[in-house]
Every structure is written in C-alpha cells, then in structure tokens.
Image (spheres, helix red, strand yellow):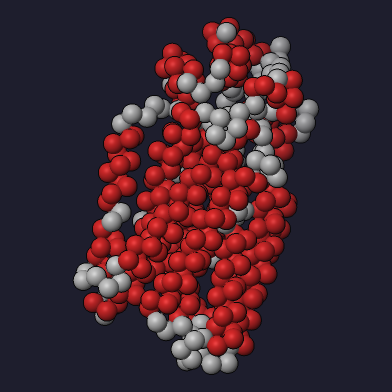
Amino acid sequence: MTLTIPSAPGSSGYLDMYPERRMSYFGNSYILGLTVTAGIGGLLFGYDTGVISGALLYIKDDFDVVKQRVGVASVTAPVYIAEASPSEVRGGLVSTNVLMITGGQFLSYLINSAFTQVPGTWRWMLGVSGVPAVVQFVLMMFMPESPRWLFMKNRKEEAIQVLTRMYDISRLEDEIDHLSAAEEEEKQRKHTVSYLEAFQQFTGINTVMYYSPTIVQMAGFHSNQLALLLSLIVAAMNAAGTVVGIYFIDHCGRKKLALSSLCGVIISLIILSVSFFKQSDASSSDGGLYGWLAVLGLALYIAFFAPGMGPVPWTVNSEIYPQQYRGICGGMSATVNWISNLIVAQTFLSVAEAAGTGVTFLILAGIAVLAAVFVIVFVPETQGLTFSEVEQIWKERAWGKNSGWGSSSESNDMDGLLEQGS
C-alpha cells in the first residue's frame, strides 16, 4: 500500500486545525538562542567581508600590490537553524543568520571608522574579529545536534530531548511523528538553488559591500574618512533591510520577496549606471550632483537587495534538499555562491577600468533581469511548508502529481517508524 501522510506541522491545514500550536519568532527562547549562537558565524563572515573594504584604503599605503580576497563561507549555520526551526517561522529564523552577516558588515564599518586615526589601522581592523570567534567557540560547546540530524542517525532519544525544549506536548507528538515518517528523496535539487546563489552574487551585492568606499571615491568623494562614513550608512541600511526581510519572508513568501527585491535592484543599478555616465566633474572634492546620485543609487540598491535577495537564496538553500543530502548539496550551493563572489570581486575594478563604471553597473542590471526571469520560472514557493511538503513539490515537478510516495515495502517501513515515533 502507499503511505498517506496527513497534513503536517507547519502546513496551513495543520495550523488552521490547531491554531494554538502556531509559534512566533520570539515564541521560544531556546530556539532563538540556538539561532543566535549559530549565527555568530554569520557575524564573523559579515565582519570579514565588510572590514576589508575599509582596510584596503590603508593596506595599500603599506604595500604596493594588494590582492582583494575573501575566505570560504560555511553553509552549516543556515542549515542548522532551518532544521531546528518550526516551519511557520523558519524563513525568519534562517534570515537571522543573514542579519548577523549584515550586522557584522555594519560593525566592521564602525570599527573601521574608530581605527582610522590609530597606529596600525588595518591591523586592528582585522584583529578585532577574534573576539566573536572565541565567544562562538565557547557557546557551541553547549549546543545540541539538530533533531533532524539525530533522527537520521537513529539517535531518537537525543532528538526527542532536544524537541521537548522546543515544543509543548501537543505539538511535540506531531513533530516526532513527522520526523519518523520523513522519506528519502529520490532526486536532488541542487541546480535551482545553485543558480539562485550565483545570481545573488552576479547582481553585485558583495561588489557593493567590498568596494563601497572605493565606489564612493570613484564618484568623486576622495576623503578616506568621508568614504568610510558614507559606506557606514550603506552598511546600516543593509542590516536594517535584513530586519525587514525577516518579517516579510514568512508573511509574503520567498518568491514574491525575491522578485520585488530584484525589481528595485534593477532600478538602482540603472541609477548608478546613469550617475557614472553623466558625471560631469569626477575630480570635485564634493562629488558634484552625479556623485551624490551615485551614493543615492548605492543606498537604494541596499534598501531593495537586503530584504529580498539577501536572505531568500540562503533560506531556500536550507529548505529544499532531502535530509540525507542537505549538508553536501547545501555546501555545493554555497561553493557556487562564493566562487561567483570571487569572480565578481576580482573582475569588478578591472571591468570598470576597461569598460567604464557606468557600463559595469549596466551589465549587473542586465544580470538582475535574467535573475528575475529565473525566479519566475524555476523557483518554487516554500513559505510555511514542512520539509516533506517541499520534497513533494519536487516529486510532482519530476514525475507529475499522480506519482506515488513509494513501494509497498517502503510503506511498511514507514508504518513501523510511525509506531516507534508514537
């Protein structure tokens, strides 16, 4: 016989039937604590990617040749948060890791500004990142493995102990049944998210974050301090925009949020392109009218990118893979993200010098248009769905809506697991 899985925790039917079991973003301090602890890794990454933009202004004073280079980011934190989150607030909690990244970038600009007049400037800027690293190392010693991973490794008693700290007894039983009935997915979905992660980078976000002081100077503002100050404002908007995204990602959905974000990004990149095309006096100390228009374009870019294309790729990346492949496929998508990041970071200044800054931003705008088309055609909506329901979307795409869940022997195995979970 074929296993029929009832409406599962987090789906609209389940929560409509039991509205008292719905959880809010701040509904469980234990889950929020796990999220923040895991997110310190995002804070470190954000600080490292942000601090280099200011440090470059001073490193080049000490070294004739400077290479713009970023470390490899781990996908572990968003995957861990997703596996430890109730589905109805999973998007917001995973996006908290993105908030930590953007918060780290904002913090890096504050630190950059604080050390501009201190001997050893860039050495202090880079060295401060050791503090949150030590804090996270200590806190992670007290963190459990995610309950889904424990179930997968047949360590169910440990998983149940973790789940009891997340849910009350009525929902706890349903979550255990749901985890016990989780079925291995036959197909991997790495390509959709890999392309989405690549588009996140090729629309220029980390170019803006790495080179925002440089872009400000290219717009005509030649003071290092003024460039850092204006970039600090951009970083603050990035962090604030992520907070907005945390709210909307579980209320408006991933797909709508990404599309609205990309529309704004396209407009902002066109403004940036026009400002550099029309700049009349690039050598002016105040940047002139078009210098300020470039700064406005940067601010608008962040205001539109941060709530949508910032958190959405990472959230979807943590949701769509089957349990057995979530780590490796998530890592593959993250690798695509940062290879794309490396390509953009290493080529931006060269392309801007060869073709002009206005043309470069116009190219990024064209890529953003392609990204919007890709989201419309290929990216599914995963808002409020359990992992099993997300897997069913891909089953239907691959084999049609009439495809079965599995063979008789698989169904019998599932029945046995359900009895154990009960």
Where does the image place residue 274, in percent across and percent down from the top left? 64, 81
Front in this rendered view, residue 158 or 192: 158
Placement of 382 over or under 261, stated as above or below: above
Placement of 115 over or under 319, stated as above or below: below
Quadrant for residue 184, please give it.
Answer: top right
Placement of 133 over or under 109, stated as above or below: above
Front in this rendered view, residue 348 or 2: 348
Q: Residue furthest left?
A: 119
Q: Quadrant of the C terminus?
A: top right
Placement of 12 over or under 236, stated as above or below: above
Q: Which residue corresponds to the image point at 57% horizontal and 56% vertical from the top-left?
A: 241
Q: Is residue 268 left or right of residue 216?
A: right
Front in this rendered view, residue 207 or 140: 140
Q: Residue furthest right?
A: 402
Q: Which residue corresponds to the image point at 43% horizontal and 71% vertical from the top-left?
A: 229
Visible residue check, residue 46: no
Where does the image place residue 83, in percent across and percent down from the top left? 51, 31
Q: Which residue corresponds to the image point at 58% horizontal and 45% vertical from the top-left?
A: 246
Quadrant for residue 318, please give it.
Answer: top right
Visible residue check, residue 135: yes
Where does the image place residue 349, in percent across and percent down from the top left? 45, 76
Where does the image place residue 393, in percent across and percent down from the top left? 70, 35
Front in this rendered view, residue 105 or 415: 105
Q: How many marks?
A: 0
Quadrant for residue 217, please give it.
Answer: bottom left
Q: Which residue corresponds to the image point at 51% horizontal and 66% vertical from the top-left?
A: 234
Q: Quadrant of the N terminus?
A: top right
